[in-house]
Structures are given as C-alpha cells and as structure tokens.
Image (cartoon, rainbow, N blue to C red):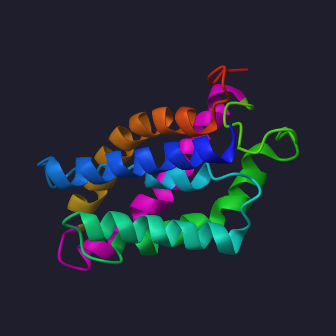
Amino acid sequence: MNNKSFIINYLILLAADILVLALCNLPQFLFVTILPVMVMCLPRSVNTPLGMAIAFATGFAADFLTTGALGLSSAALVVVGLLRTPLLSLLFGDTLPLHRSTVAFTSKGFAGAVLFVLIPLAVFLAIYITIDGAGMRSLWFNCLRFIISLAADSLLSFGAAVMLTSDKKGGQWN
C-alpha cells in the first residue's frame, strides 16, 4: 500500500470512528473505537515521537469532533503511540517483511493478529476508562465497561487493521 492510499484509508476510518461516536446513542457500558489499532498500523517508517504526535492529533480530532471531553482519547492514544514500536518488536520480532512499508499484522497467523489488536486496545481502554471515571464510577462499572468495550472494539478493529495493512490483493492469513 502506498502512502497516499494509507493516508486516505486512515482518514476514512478516523471519520467513521468520529461519526459513530458523535451520532450513535451508545449505552454507558460501551465505548466504541478503532483508534488504537489505527495507531498501531502506522507505517514502519514512522518513528516513536512522530507516532506519538500522530496519535495525539488523531485523539484530539476524535475528542474535538465528538461529545467527549478534550484530552481523554489523546492521553490514552499517546501511550499507545509510545508503546507501538516495543509492541511490534515483541509481537513480530525480526519477521516483519522488509519490503512492506506497513505492518503485516497477519504474518504471525491468527494468534499474532489477535494479540496485535487486543494489547493496544486493552492499554487504551484501561487508560481511557480510568481517566473518564475519575473516581466517580465504581470499580465494577469500570470493569464491566472495559470488558464489553474490549469485546466490541476488537471485532471492529480487525476490519480496520485489515484495511490499513492490506496490499492491493487484500489481507491474507499465513
């Protein structure tokens, strides 16, 4: 995937995430987002400081254009941007193909793809829900919100990851 198509796909997914958050009346127990996986799918040429800046801008745009408080998504996404390179090294090691500019999240099979989606989502949701609750909601409520949101977001994030990391032939499981 070339840079122009990646940027277009990234902006389309960002707009879709913003529209879902702004227009859908979701229950309190559910927070729908694909932003952490979008940050993880940034091209490998993006270093950590630039990845954190892109994560901040993405989170700020999502917060500004939805009904959320400014800074919630940004704070959680910056941490995902910081952990992006170590997570990619942990999950894929040296097996990332050198000829691809994007991350081939299916290169380790289904188990690697599940970890690629679940780890950044869990980090993001843990930070987001903790900051959003800010001592006002009980622990059971926050835990239930985390579990329900992680289950729903992981399903949506697989599609986003395939869209952002696939080449012209489409994503393929190894």
Q: Quadrant of residue 146?
A: bottom left
In front: 110, or 147?
110
Count of number-bearing discs: 0
Q: What residue is at 25 percent from the left and 49 percent from the top?
A: 19
Q: Which residues are magenta?
A: 109-138
Q: Quadrant of residue 140?
A: bottom left
Q: Quadrant of the C terminus?
A: top right
Residue 110 in picture, x, y percent from top left: 63, 27
Residue 107 in picture, x, y percent from top left: 74, 31
Residue 49 in picture, x, y percent from top left: 68, 75
Q: Is the stretch drawn in magenta largely helix, strand or loop?
A: helix
Which residue occupies the extreme front position in the image?
A: 4
Q: Quadrant of the N terminus?
A: top right
In front: 156, or 30?
156
In front: 155, or 139?
155
Position of 27 compared to 63: left or right? Answer: left
Q: What residue is at 55 percent from the left and 51 percent from the top?
A: 119
Q: What residue is at 47 percent from the left and 52 percent from the top?
A: 121
Q: Is residue 129 visible?
A: no
Residue 72 in picture, x, y percent from top left: 34, 73
Q: Quadrant of residue 16?
A: top left
Q: Is-magenta flag for residue 117?
A: yes
Q: Is residue 54 above or below residue 19?
A: below
Q: Is residue 50 above or below residue 6?
A: below
Position of 106 compared to 25: left or right? Answer: right
Q: Is residue 155 visible?
A: yes
Q: What residue is at 53 percent from the left and 34 percent from the top?
A: 163
In front: 115, or 74?
74
Q: Is-magenta flag for residue 110?
A: yes
